[in-house]
Image (spheres, rainbow, N blue to C red):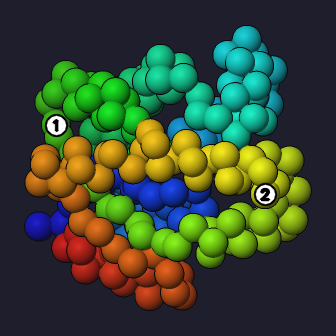
Amino acid sequence: MTARRLLMLGPPGAGKGTQALRLLKKLGVPQISTGDMLREAVASDSPVGREARSYMEAGKLVPDEVVIGVARERLAQPDCADGFILDGFPRTVAQAEALDEILEELGCALESCVALDVDEDALVERLLRRAQIEGRSDDNEETIRTRMQEYRSKTAPLIDHYRRAGVLVEVDGLGEIAEISRRIEEAIGA
């Protein structure tokens, strides 16, 4: 059986978004990128967007209550009824527990957590290249290293959370995009 309710997990720059986009074409389910939603809020200059901007520019994670509210609304939308690919949420154990509650309320469960494993130095190099190409002011070496530390302390514990839940699959995130996609598809039965 192919998993259709997925979470992409990995440090910043691991390729979660790239792989989620490839999977959504294959599975026909929406990608839910919290990062994109937060960047849209920042661009709109709404109160929550201004709050999110201060955290993002400092390389810090946006507080749980803001992200959980955004995710709750998004997962309840009709296009998520047959599945979804989460990219960037949850980022903390508290968010993972909130996600479990949200999915229970919706009458479904996470089927697979795909954890991309990539060396930190390779990620820093990858993110600095992306910053140049995309002109992203939030990606400089100092903020990247801060985000890596945030990931190690707050997000990496999710690996154990999803391992205990029995839905974790670990995938080598280094190599050509197509090869990584093949590894992921094999791991989720696609």
State the SS at label 1: loop
Residue 57 vs residue 2: left or right? right
Vertically, is 166 above or below 78?
Answer: below
Q: Position of residue 3 (x, y in %)?
A: 21, 60
Q: Position of residue 174 (x, y in %)?
A: 50, 81
Query: What's the residue at 45%, 58% (across, down)?
Result: 10
Q: Which label number is shown at residue 129?
A: none
Residue under pointer 2: 141
At label 1, counting other C-alpha atoms closer than 10 Å, the crowd grade (few under 14, some 14-19, many 20 or more) is some
Query: What's the residue at 40%, 56% (across, down)?
Result: 8
Vertically, is 158 above or below 61?
Answer: below
Query: What's the residue at 41%, 67% (across, down)?
Result: 116
Quadrant of the image for the N terminus? bottom left
What's the residue type where badge 1 is placed? Answer: Cys
Decide if residue 32 is in sight here: no
Query: Alpha-carbon distance for marks 2 and 1?
Result: 40 Å
Residue under pointer 1: 108
What's the residue type where badge 2 is placed? Answer: Glu
Give yes or no for contact between labels 2 and 1 (Cβ–Cβ under 8 Å).
no
State the SS at label 2: helix
Q: Place residue 115 in its image quadrant.
A: bottom left
In the depicted view, which residue is nearer to us: 28 or 44? 44
Q: Place residue 76 in its image quadrant.
A: top left
Q: Position of residue 25 (x, y in %)?
A: 44, 67
Nearer the observer, disc 2 or disc 1?
2
Residue 82 vs residue 88: left or right? left
Query: What's the residue at 87%, 65% (across, down)?
Result: 132
At label 2, counting other C-alpha atoms closer than 10 Å, the crowd grade (few under 14, some 14-19, many 20 or more) is some
Quadrant of the image for the C terminus? bottom left
Q: Place residue 12 in its image quadrant.
A: bottom right
